[in-house]
Image: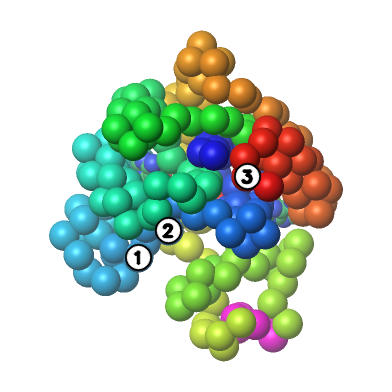
Amino acid sequence: MVVVLLGPPGVGKGTQAVRLVDELRAAHVSTGDLLRAARREGTELGRLAQGFMDRGELVPDGLILDLVREHLAGIDGGTDVLFDGFPRTTDQADGLDEVLAAAGRKVDAVVLFEAPDETLVRRLSGRRSCPECGAVYNVFFGPSAAEGMCDRCGATLVHRKDDAPETVERRLQVYLEQTAPLVAHYQVHSAELTRIGADRDVEEVYADFRRAVTGLGGAA
Ligand code: AP5
């Protein structure tokens, strides 16, 4: 089963995806995580992506599709996949369809997480991320046990540069202009779309998310 997670920055896509892939032993394909890894490793892609990410703009479609193609080549064709933060434009969605079709697969379901902007802004202002193991915390809603330190690996937590207020404002605008149209795109292309109110406790959101995905068959 192939599932696409849609939703604005900070809505909780990553938080929810990590839990479900762990439970279902599925693959989690987060283009944001892949790009941050490329930056840490100092690759050509990381260098090219840096300016776009720091400004809150989308990285060009061609680079993203190459990245996803390369990453999918390393995932067994029978594995369930959750795409998080990809696709983000209709060209990326078309590109994904082509890559999947070549492997005899398709997007089976789309889950749209929704929350008001005030919630997103507060979550992003409080997010702290571990640059070593990728764990995510929130100073308001889910802090680490020792302030500023990762519970899992002990590394110093960071506030992502693109979580600065002015960049968050731009990311929200980019989401509305370039990614929100994918909702209509997927409705037309008939993948099953489930809306989940994400302005609730993580556990409540997860219960609905899990039900939406496992209820569609295949991934449970
Ligand atoms: P990316 O990393 O994908 O960022 P995003 O989509 O903006 O999503 P976020 O990671 O900010 O939020 P999230 O929804 O995963 O929330 P999270 O679970 O962390 O992309 C970054 C950049 O890379 C882009 O701006 C772009 O430049 C580039 N890029 C990436 N993919 C691209 C693509 N396909 N095309 C082009 N460019 C691309 O939660 C947020 C916080 O809230 C956390 O602190 C968490 O603990 C907390 N939280 C989560 N859920 C709850 C809850 N229910 N209650 C309380 N707190 C909660």
Q: CA distance from mark 3 to mark 2?
A: 23 Å
- Of circles 3 and 2, the one toward us is 3
Residue at left offset 52%, top offset 85%: 155
Q: Gap between marks 1 and 2, in whole Å?
A: 6 Å
Answer left or right for 2 relative to 74: right
Q: Say if the magenta span includes residue 172.
A: no
Do callouts 1 and 2 mark residues in contact (Cβ within 8 Å)?
Answer: yes
In front here: 185 or 75?
A: 75
Q: Which residue is mark 3?
A: 219
Question: How dense is the environment of label 1, judged by Cα within 10 Å: few (below 14), some, or many (20 and up)?
Answer: some
Viewed as shown, does residue 50 lie left or right of 17?
Answer: left
Residue segment shown in magenta:
146-151
Cβ at disc 3 under 8 Å from ligand 1? no
Q: Which residue is mark 2?
A: 33
Q: Where is residue 93 shown, x and y percent of the image?
A: 39, 28
Label 3 or label 1, whichever comes before in sequence order = 1
For mark 1, what is the residue? 37
**Residue 124 visible in rendering:** no
Q: Is residue 148 highlighted in magenta?
A: yes
Q: Which mark is residue 211?
A: none
User: Compared to 44, does 65 lie above or below?
Assistant: above
Query: Tag 3's secondary structure?
Result: loop
In this picture, residue 205 sits left or right of residue 83: right
Name the magenta segment's main secondary structure. Answer: loop
Q: Nearer the viewer, residue 42 or 173?
A: 42
- The residue that appears at 70% across and 68% down in the rendered structure is 139
Relative image position of residue 6 (x, y in whole percent): 55, 35
- Horizontal and vertical percent for residue 164? 50, 55
